Amino acid sequence: MSHSERLALLVLAMCLAGCNSRLGEDVEIVPGELQADSFQEEQRTSLPSHVAEERFVFVASGLPQAQYETIRDFFKDVLTQSNTGDIVHVVACPSHEPIVSLEIPHGQVRVWLKDSTFAKAAKTIKEFLLRAPDLSVANCPPAQLDFPRIVRTVKQLSAGKERLTIFAFGDPVFCPDPEHAWRFTDFCVPSDAALHSEECPFGPVERVSLPKPGAEMFLIARGAEWGDSAEHRVAIERFYGLYLNEVGGVFQGVFGDAKTAFKKSLHSHDNPSLPVAGLRADPFVGMWCTRHTQLRASFDPRATEVHIAAIPAATRRAPDVQIAPPSPLAAVPPALESYLQSLPPDNIAISIRWVALRGNRGDSQSDLDIWIRDKTSREPELNYRHMQTTFGVLFRDVQHDLDSDDFTQWEYVEIAHDRLQDLDVWIDAYRTSCDLTCIVRAGWRGEVRETQIDFQGSSGDHAGDESRRAASPAWKHLSLQELFAE
């Protein structure tokens, strides 16, 4: 076994402790020099008021090999934030075959690595991820999750822990068969009334429920460009939000990368998403087509509708198809400049992206974070840990550099008042691997201003210098008053 293979096995072994494996043979334990000490820098402090948590990880077959490498890294993140007694379930999709269910044991990581059951479980997961790209189900396209079965599978496997989180790696576009009548292809998504119909695979929702009210779900796609259009993605995310809401859960959205989803999951239970709009009264049971549904010219985060431009001549096997009615807006157009100029006059917007320097473009390891304190409020700072407060909302927590003006990829905050003097704004280099330049664009009272902030270093502080930010090279202060006084 090569050095890299041993290291990969360790990453998996660190993630999978105390489970029942179906493999009976002995497994080689990783040598001492590659044990727990190799990962101390990655570990972060667990939540101060920890409650027993249960995490489900659904992994689709047929994904690109590179995404399975990402999933291995994801398991490492899961472990570093797990506590004794937490449970992790791994399920293969679309078959929904349970791979392992494990409970995090007592002791340190180096103790877990000496446990033969732990090592056997690691091998089970490693072998599954190695063969998953080539697994297939007859007539089923790759990367399918069989989404309607997820709630039932969770209910069957759940151990009843106090907190429940679901991660699903696969295609958000439900299509178990290219000829399936309820497939989400061709710009289509089920109508609201379909959730209460036996005809729809997602219904009737009255017959299913999650074992833990408030359970959260994060869907991780292969990137940001899934579905047939931006409008189609909006409609699908809305439908999943309604579905999860009806079965007692919360759909946190579709994410383009696993790290962003997991980072949000660490604090989302304490800071839930905005409420999902209720089901429409329209009794139509069938598929809505979003081909001619248009997003607003300027984005309003509080908006709940988009407008229909025309009725398409759509044909499809049963169920019937209609033009989609106005849908809640969950995506933003790429025109950042025009959006900032169209802000409500009593709001402030701050957006950032960053670019790696010295020929290091595409640095997927960099992560800058906005931190904002309202001096007149006793609430916690607005940041990735607290994405919603009474004075503002962090709409997107980006974790990679970006050399683009596409607004959908910027980290973005909107403040619900216009008092520049009341805001204390900081930018933290949470993680870096090279020097970075951060581009800041802010909107206030019809004006848009831009500035740049340089970060030098190759490690970041993982928010560890929060209490001493003024003296830390990982933290930079942004004065909005000075920016708009120029």
Image (cartoon, grey):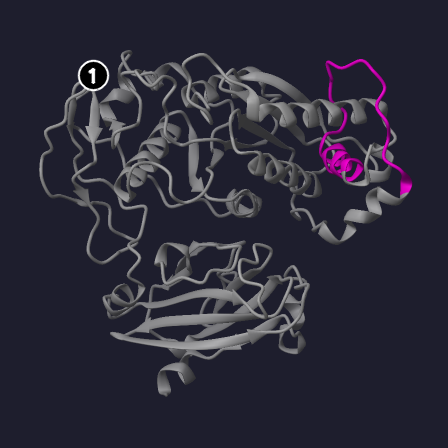
Q: Does 11 appear in magenta?
A: yes
Q: Read off the residue under disc 1.
A: 319
User: The disc labelled 1 sits on which kind of residue?
Assistant: Pro
Q: Is residue 289 visible?
A: yes
Q: Secondary structure at mark 1?
A: loop
Q: Where 435 sits versus 396, above or below?
A: below
Left/right of residue 334 with respect to residue 138 in the rendered view: left
Q: Which residues are magenta?
A: 5-32
**Which residue is at the front of the view, 329 or 438?**
438
Q: Does 108 appear in magenta?
A: no
**Which residue is at the front of the view, 97 or 128?**
128
Q: Residue furthest right?
A: 32
**Where's the N terminus, which quadrant?**
top right
Q: What residue is rendered at 61% in x and 27% in y?
A: 161
Q: Give the quarter of the image for residue 29.
A: top right
Q: What residue is rendered at 24% in x and 74% in y?
A: 446
